[in-house]
Image (cartoon, coloured by chain):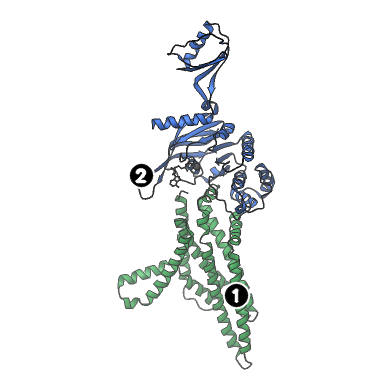
Chain colours: A green, B blue
Amino acid sequence: MRGLIQHTISELFDRKLVYAFALVTLVAVLLVLFSTTIDISFGGEEQDLGDLSQAMGDTFLKGLSMFLSFLVFLAVMGTAGLIPTMLSPGQSDYFLSKPLSRTRLMLSKFCSIFSVYGAVIVVCGAVVWLAMSVSYLGFSGAIFYLFLSHLISLFIWLSITALAGVMSNSSAMSIMAAFTVWVLKVVVSSARAFEDVLGSKLLKFFLDALYQILPKTDQIETIGERLTSDLFIASYSAVWTSLLFAVVLLFLTVVTFNRRSY
Amino acid sequence: MNVIEVTELSKVYASGLGRGGIVALDGVSFSVEQGQIVGLLGPNGAGKTTLFKILLNITKPTGGRARLSGLPASDPLSRQRVGYLPENHRFPDHQTGIGLMELTARLYGVESSLFEDQLEPLLELVGMEKWGETKLRKYSKGMLQRIGLAQALVSDPEILLLDEPTDGVDPVGKIEIREALLKIRNQGKSIILNSHLLSEVESVADRVVILSKGKIVKSGSMAELTSQKSHIIIEAEIGHNIVEIPPRLGKVLSVSTKNMIVEVVDDSNLNPILELLFLKKIPIRSVKPMRISLEQSFLNTITEQEQTG
Ligand SMILES: Nc1ncnc2c1ncn2[C@@H]1O[C@H](COP(=O)(O)OP(=O)(O)OP(=O)(O)O)[C@@H](O)[C@H]1O
Ligand SMILES: [Mg+2]
């Protein structure tokens, strides 16, 4: 496991992805600092400071959440090729000849990717959060939930690219799989809005089923935002069902991997 | 003790959309004893690499069994004491030489202190001590091959599976590798060497297995394969005597004043032939089977096999 984590870190540096993460973070920090100077110049003496700070907090929270989502997106795109590379001709012989069961090898690789890129996301997010704290100190320790929700979302997306990667042995295919799920999610949720107009019972059932099956990363991220703002959460079902989805996908990944010849 | 045991192993690769498939291995059985170097020979596509991959559970067999150190190949523990140098390897090339060795050691669960002690000697063994810090993507082909051999040795393996280890290595390096292999064998380790360089195999292997079209067409000790039993060299003071051998016993292939080469029809005919020499009072100095090169033996085996189908 330690070997694979180190390997994943060296892959991260080799692919120059760290620079992408650093660049994006730098831009975000500059944006935060820039926008706070504007805010301060607008902030007149007479305004209710409480309201202002509340609005600022909301904006920052939303902004940080979006930034984290973008980092998750970057990580998913950046790591989609890692498993197919490990299983590519010439490299698979190297990894598979080691005294690790296939299950252990795959889960170790998956966990290495998740922990290395998860750590990068947390660090980049924390930097932006610190920049925000320069002008706004309203965040409590509850910010933890925001990070957690995005890590869960990363876990789910990685399980999709892992399964697609093992099944297709191609990085392009695993990126496409992630995109397909994303597009499906958008299509299903907008179609559900028109469900009543569409009328057909079968279609409605089909859409509902699809909605339940597909991971609900957006809802999870919203739950994270609401927990951070200490707002009421009606249901955590989005978290459990999506995690179940990811676990099933990981299970299928391992099963497929165990049956393959390379 | 047998460190490798293969019974009735077969592998059929599915061939795209067509029916049937490519038969890579067809009922292969053999075993390797501890402390032996076995040369695995065969034409391209004979199934040699496939055999290695099945031993390591990289590829699943269609039928039959493979065991390493008494454990079935499907058990990851069977690979604990096995070092492998794949054919056409593409090691992660953003690693340095030492990085690759370290990753390998970690994957085998070798302790760090043990690894540190081994690193220098191993790099020296393959002549790569100056290149350890360089990234693999800057290596030449022979250098990759050398570091590949070093990583196969990181776990102090009992069994070494080497798929064309000297491919792309310069002549001096080939000799160094050959000497390294003999040294490893002398430590009581077993090696299966898959190579197209027959002279190289001839100089290190104790036993040879020849595969062709997925079947073992010949196997035996090096001495058995390179001796041509039916051809006997008789060293004797023949002088100007004329020795005639009845056709039912054999045939004189060549004769000089000092020796004659006889093709005997059957081993049991050797005595009657020698008696003929005794009768003529010709002193006999030695009788031995004629040796042929491994290359010749290999060619004979393959052509024979192709003629019989
Ligand atoms: N992944 C694969 N899919 C389909 N067929 C394969 C695959 N790998 C090998 N084969 C086929 O199996 C047969 C044996 O191949 P293998 O690589 O074992 O030969 P080899 O003896 O190692 O040959 P070489 O000396 O050229 O390395 C060949 O006919 C080859 O085409
Ligand atoms: Mg081969």
Quadrant where the image shows the N terminus of chain A: bottom right
Residue at 32%, 78% (x, y): give it: A197
**Count of marks placed on residues:** 2
What is the residue that sits farthest to the front in this orientation? B240
Whether residues under marks 1 and 2 lie with C-beta atoms below 8 angstroms apart, the answer is: no
Left or right: B225 as drawn, with respect to B125: left
Picture coordinates of residue B293, whole percent (x, y): 54, 28
| Mark drawn on residue B29 | none
Label 1 in the same subunit as label 2: no
Picture coordinates of residue B86, whole percent (x, y): 54, 45
> Which residue is tagged 2?
B20
Quadrant location of residue B39? top right
Picture coordinates of residue A99, whole percent (x, y): 55, 47
Front residue of B136 and B235: B235
Picture coordinates of residue A233, whole percent (x, y): 49, 76
Determine the secondary structure under disc 2.
loop
Type of amino acid at the residue the image marks with label 1: Val
Q: Is residue B232 visible?
A: yes
| Chain for disc number 2 | B
Determine the secondary structure under disc 1.
helix
> Which residue is tagged 1?
A27
Task: Measure the C-alpha gap from mark 1 to mark 2.
Answer: 58 Å
Front residue of B21 and A160: B21
Residue at 55%, 6% (x, y): give it: B281
Type of amino acid at the residue the image marks with label 2: Gly
Rate crowding at label 2 as few (under 14), some (14 to 19) or many (20 or more) other CA atoms within 10 Å.
Answer: few
Quadrant location of residue B266? top left
| Chain for disc number 1 | A
Image position of B284 with respect to B307: above or below: above
Left or right: A225 as drawn, with respect to B246: right
Quadrant location of residue B308? top left
Front residue of A257 and A32: A32
